[in-house]
Image (cartoon, grey):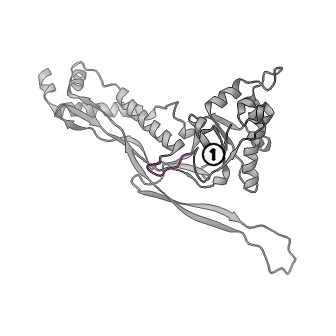
Amino acid sequence: MRGQFLNDAPRALAFLVSQQAFIEPGVYRTQYPAVRYPRLIPVDVNAPEWVPSVMYFGMDTVGQAKWLTGNAQDLPRADVLRNMYETSVSMAGIGYGYDLEELGKAQLLNMPLTADKAAAARQGSEEFIDRVAIFGDTAKGYSGLVNHPSVTAGSAAPTGTGSATTFASKTAEQVTADVNGALTGIFTGTGTVELADTLLLPYTQMSDLAVRRIDPMSQMTILDWLRRNNIFTLETGQPLDIMGVRGLETAGAGGTARMMAYRRDPTVLKLWLPMPFRFFPAFQTGPFRFDVPGAFRLGGVDIKRPGACRYLDGI
């Protein structure tokens, strides 16, 4: 029986297929802490899986009421402006596999295959999507969350020690002024329509603000102070969501550190993911080799309302 299995590729493949039914459901449920895109960007999975591109409409409203008389003929009208956009969708993939000896030993010892290889493939797919979502992909023409050309980029005020712009050179009040400047710029720049609820910082700057106190006599850190004393919180009573994102240390103009403020809402931005990662049926790829392919299809990050986003460089 032992020799029969090791020389019987169809039985090896059948054993692998039976194991997939137990391995893959658990792998799909696994969350990966280092992958940030689901929390940073609304993800849209509603388009057909094999669609070559996604078309959508951006919308804005115009019109303003005014005083009238009873016989007025010049009633102002509201209107809706729609612009059509299209983003391509591309396919990527990663899989895992076994050789005949691995499958033979597993069946001989009556031991199930572990989920380690499948989990590694799934994690590889999530890290790939995370990288494209945050930084884009020049080969595909995709822009990312932190380097989108439609988003206005400003420079931090030179109010730090020696006219420096970096947060490390500034007091709590000066850092707060920079953050509120970006938030206020979004609010006033959109006619008080958009109000950013999310702030992204490089981990270096976020770590510094998380341990540096607002003054020697207080236990409150600058990060705590920012969460309470910002335009969004003062306007809505809700806490500003502040998160660290790797890669922002050099994402700004001239390789400087970049901060991003934006409203995290699917009407503002989204990542197109028509086909989330999935495994396909196992197949034999060589005399002693069996592979399980995995694939997914995604587009870039579309920022439909760039006025609700702003970058601040040189922090």
Check the image and report above or below for 51 versus 137: below
Please give left or right for residue 244 compared with residue 136 in the image. right
Q: Quadrant of the C terminus?
A: top right
Q: Is residue 284 magenta?
A: no
> For the view shown, which residue lies furthest in the front direction?
162
Please tell me which residue is depicted at 73% across the width and 35% down the height of the picture: 164
Q: Nearer the viewer, residue 189 or 96?
A: 189
Q: Is residue 29 left or right of residue 204?
A: left
**Most extreme residue toward the top, as rendered?**
109
Residue nearer the viewer, 73 or 268:
268
Residue that mark 1 sits on: 264
Which residue lies most toward the right here? 69
In the rendered image, residue 55, in percent from the top left (x then y), is placed at 50, 60
Point out residue 24 in the picture as x, y percentages from the top left corner: 37, 34
Q: Which amino acid does the dot numbered 1 rest on?
A: Arg
Q: Is residue 296 positioned above or below 15 on the image? A: below
**Regarding mark 1 in the picture, which secondary structure is present there?**
loop
Tell me which residue sits at (45%, 39%) in the image: 128
Q: Position of residue 224 (x, y in %)?
A: 74, 29
Residue count near mark 1 (Cα–Cα under 10 Å), binned few <14, some 14–19, many ≥20: many
The N terminus lies in which quarter of the figure? top left
Q: Residue at x 81, y 24 (%)?
A: 215
Q: Nearer the viewer, residue 242 or 161?
A: 161
Residue 117 position (above or below residue 260): above
Decide if residue 206 is on the left or right side of residue 86: right
Where does residue 76 sit, x and y in percent of width and height?
77, 73
Q: Place residue 97 in its image quadrant.
A: top left
| Magenta residues, start to end | 138-145
Q: Main secondary structure of the magenta part?
A: loop
Res 115 visible: no
Residue 74 in view of the camera:
yes
Q: In the rendered picture of this protein, how many numbered marks are placed on residues? A: 1
